[in-house]
Image (spheres, coloured by chain):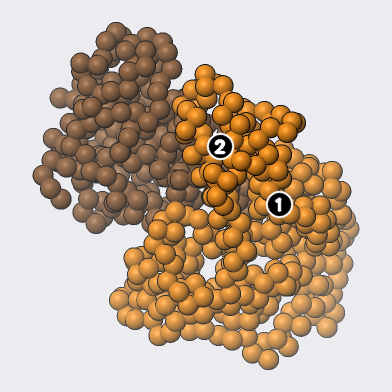
Chain colours: A orange, B brown
């Protein structure tokens, strides 16, 4: 973008090319006229006394405006770059023993992280999150598509690799489902917002046990509905290539369908879980012991078969849960239940 | 590290946004590495933060503005605080202050400026906070553990819209998650010897003392009117 050139163009045209400039002016309480005024002329016409309140002069206003456009364009470009492969180069366990292997995570796979409490699961996830460069206690380093991240960019926090979904998370905003998704889409500078809203909404409803409308306030959604909306939103709109799931509860969301949606959207899904049903839904399990990745278990064919049986058992248990929820009596024969 | 010089950082943010928690989680690993860290806490009427710092083994000084404007109180005492830090031989001195009216900002030119805000305060907050956020070098976002991913992303985006130069780092004040990059910023903060003659990044509003009248320079000669000083002996 050449800012000097931009100054010569009509304001209306500039706003069309860079719609986010509306946010820039809104933050400075500057209203936008609906006239044929040129962009440069419009900037120069701002009341100096009003600008003073924001500690701005004419010069500074132009400078900040140019910086703003640069930043937003950069943001757009980053959003388009998709990371396909994340390498965690081997580090050391708590005794200083070298880890045996590098770890490569690719888009579209589901990886479970398992190990006893204190074994270092959170450490591994934190290493990925902060793009460790041999500067964390484990000495691991992270490569993005085979390249070490730029240190300046790393310190700027621009690149958030990990999106998180956990049971503790709630919506705190006072918005309807539709407004909520729209706001997220706007912040991603999405062009076809209506299409995106429809996509996230339909996906969320398909995941939730009970349907809800686009007008429902997000704070009024049930636990299962909230989780469904969060999963659909992360799948379709999050900037981050990795989705970290911290145990999704059983109630109200189809967990395996949720994993499918995330995988379809080319996420790398990491799950910290000890639930056999979820663990076997993954492609691999990272076994963490004493601070290091002790082994990587690929889900075997036998395990996949076992998963089908487990899913059936889970299904039956769910029916019992439904009965409890409906206030019914559970008269059943355990022998029969397991058949 | 050359004699007398040490790193100084101003940390500001709305009340209860997690300033003390973030500072503690970030300096604990530095202290473990042998850093000597001191904290000056500026507050209005009461503050129990010094107890938390003391429990963590951090030398702390508390200053209460009482009936004065807390931001004016801050600027009238900050040079003394730096001299105290120098005398104590700290490697790192941090000032924590609660920006109360969102009109002011304690950030000083060429001194690392950190602004802390929490996700619970809502996505409109970044626009409301003003100079404390706009002039910061590092913006720390706390309490991300209890809001949705969408809200975290929208929040960070809006922070960048207000301040495109700053680093924006999510840090969990309870677990310390995300503190490594903040530690690295702390370790690279510009060194100071004295703040005499330094300037605030943003002018203070009109009210009582010389700073109310637009003074931005630090130093005893510039302090006229209702000035209250702390005891650093
Ligand atoms: N490779 C390592 N080198 C040095 N320290 C490590 C390493 N891995 C983990 N640690 C440290 O061990 C402690 C426990 O690790 P962590 O919190 O990651 O365990 P966890 O598996 O997440 O436990 P929980 O299941 O209780 O959440 C932490 O202080 C962490 O920094
Ligand atoms: N859930 C959560 N709570 C936090 C976080 N950071 C701080 N808190 C809590 O927020 C409250 C205020 O924190 P404090 O550090 O005293 O804020 P200060 O007034 O800005 O110094 C405390 O109860 C903290 O435990 C965070 O990242 N997540
Ligand atoms: Mg853990
Ligand atoms: Mg505090």
Residue drawn where x is 28% and y is 13% of the image = B227
Which secondary structure, mark 2? Answer: helix
Query: Residue A150: x, y in percent?
Result: 42, 64
Q: Which chain hosts label 2?
A: B
Query: Is the residue marked 1 within 8 Å of ligand 2, measured from its CB?
Result: no
Above or below, A198 relative to A297: above
Instruction: State whether residue A74 appears in this view.
Output: yes
* Residue A132 drawn above or below residue B31: below
Closer to the camera, A119 or A196? Answer: A196
Mark 2 Cα shell of 10 Å, populated few (<14), some (14-19), many (≥20): many
Judge whether residue B147 can be spotted in this image: no
Same-chain check, marks 2 and 1: no
Whether residue A130 sits left or right of residue B128 in the image: it is: left
- Chain bearing tag 1 is A
Quadrant placement of the C terminus of chain A: bottom right
The total number of labels drawn is 2
Using the rendered view, name the quadrant where residue B84 is placed. top left
Instruction: Identify the residue under disc 1.
Output: A185
- Residue B217, percent across and down? 28, 23
Q: CA distance from mark 2 to mark 1?
A: 18 Å
Q: Position of residue B162 (x, y in %)?
A: 54, 39
- Residue at 67% over, 62% down: A248
Q: Are marks 2 and 1 in contact (CB under 8 Å)?
A: no
Provide the residue designation for mark 2.
Answer: B126
Residue plotted at (48% across, 84% down): A295
Q: Residue furthest left?
A: B3
Nearest to the observer: residue B59 or residue A28: A28
Pinpoint residue A114: horizontal percent, then vertical percent: 53, 74
Q: Residues within 10 Å of mark 1 (few under 14, many from 20)?
A: many
Asked whether, in this view, residue A331 is left or right of residue B41, the answer is: right
What residue appears at the point 33 percent right and 32 percent down from the top-left corner? B108
């Amino acid at each position: 973008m050449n800012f000097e050139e931009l100054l010569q163009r009509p304001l209306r045209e500039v706003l069309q090319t860079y719609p986010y400039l509306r946010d820039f002016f809104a933050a400075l309480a500057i209203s936008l006229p609906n006239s044929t005024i040129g962009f440069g002329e419009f900037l120069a016409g701002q009341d100096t006394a009003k600008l003073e309140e924001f500690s701005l002069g004419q010069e500074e206003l132009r400078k900040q405006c140019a910086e703003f456009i640069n930043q937003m364009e950069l943001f757009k470009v980053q959003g388009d770059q998709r990371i396909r492969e994340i390498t965690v180069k081997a580090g050391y366990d708590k005794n200083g023993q070298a880890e045996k292997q590098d770890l490569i995570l690719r888009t579209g796979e589901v990886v479970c992280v398992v190990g006893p409490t204190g074994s270092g699961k959170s450490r591994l996830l934190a290493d990925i999150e902060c793009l460790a460069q041999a500067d964390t206690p484990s000495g691991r380093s992270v490569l993005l598509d085979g390249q070490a991240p730029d240190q300046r960019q790393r310190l700027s926090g621009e690149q958030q690799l990990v999106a998180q979904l956990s049971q503790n998370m709630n919506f705190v905003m006072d918005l309807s489902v539709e407004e909520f998704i729209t706001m997220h889409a706007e912040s991603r500078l999405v062009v076809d917002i209506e299409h995106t809203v429809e996509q996230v909404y339909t996906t969320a409803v398909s995941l939730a046990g009970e349907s809800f409308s686009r007008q429902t306030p997000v704070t009024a959604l049930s636990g299962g509905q909230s989780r469904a909306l969060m999963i659909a939103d992360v799948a379709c709109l999050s900037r981050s290539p990795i989705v970290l799931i911290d145990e999704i509860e059983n109630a109200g969301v189809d967990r395996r369908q949720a994993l499918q949606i995330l995988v379809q959207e080319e996420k790398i899904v990491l799950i910290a879980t000890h639930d056999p049903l979820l663990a076997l839904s993954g492609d691999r399990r990272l076994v963490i012991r004493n601070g290091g990745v002790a082994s990587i278990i690929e889900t075997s064919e036998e395990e996949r078969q076992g998963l089908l049986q487990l899913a059936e058992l889970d299904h039956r248990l769910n029916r019992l849960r439904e009965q409890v929820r409906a206030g019914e009596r559970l008269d059943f024969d355990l022998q029969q239940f397991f058949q | 590290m050359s004699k007398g010089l040490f790193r100084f950082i101003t940390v500001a943010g709305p009340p209860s946004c997690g300033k003390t928690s973030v500072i503690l989680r970030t300096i604990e690993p530095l202290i473990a590495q042998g850093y000597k860290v001191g904290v000056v806490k500026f507050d209005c009427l009461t503050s129990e933060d010094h107890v938390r710092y003391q429990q963590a083994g951090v030398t702390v000084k508390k200053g209460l503005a009482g009936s004065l404007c807390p931001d004016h109180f801050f600027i009238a005492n900050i040079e003394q605080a730096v001299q105290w830090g120098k005398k104590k031989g700290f490697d790192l001195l941090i000032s924590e202050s609660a920006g109360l009216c969102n009109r002011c900002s304690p950030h000083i030119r060429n001194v690392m400026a950190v602004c802390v805000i929490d996700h619970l305060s809502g996505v409109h907050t970044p626009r409301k906070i003003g100079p404390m956020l706009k002039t910061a070098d590092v913006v720390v976002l706390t309490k991300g553990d209890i809001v949705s991913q969408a809200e975290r992303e929208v929040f960070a985006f809006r922070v960048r819209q207000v301040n495109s130069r700053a680093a924006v780092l999510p840090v969990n004040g309870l677990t310390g998650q995300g503190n490594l990059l903040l530690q690295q910023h702390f370790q690279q903060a510009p060194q100071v010897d004295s703040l005499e003659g330094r300037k605030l990044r943003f002018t203070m509003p009109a009210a009582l003392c010389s700073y109310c009248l637009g003074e931005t320079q630090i130093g005893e000669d510039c302090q006229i009117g209702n000035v209250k000083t702390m005891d650093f002996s």
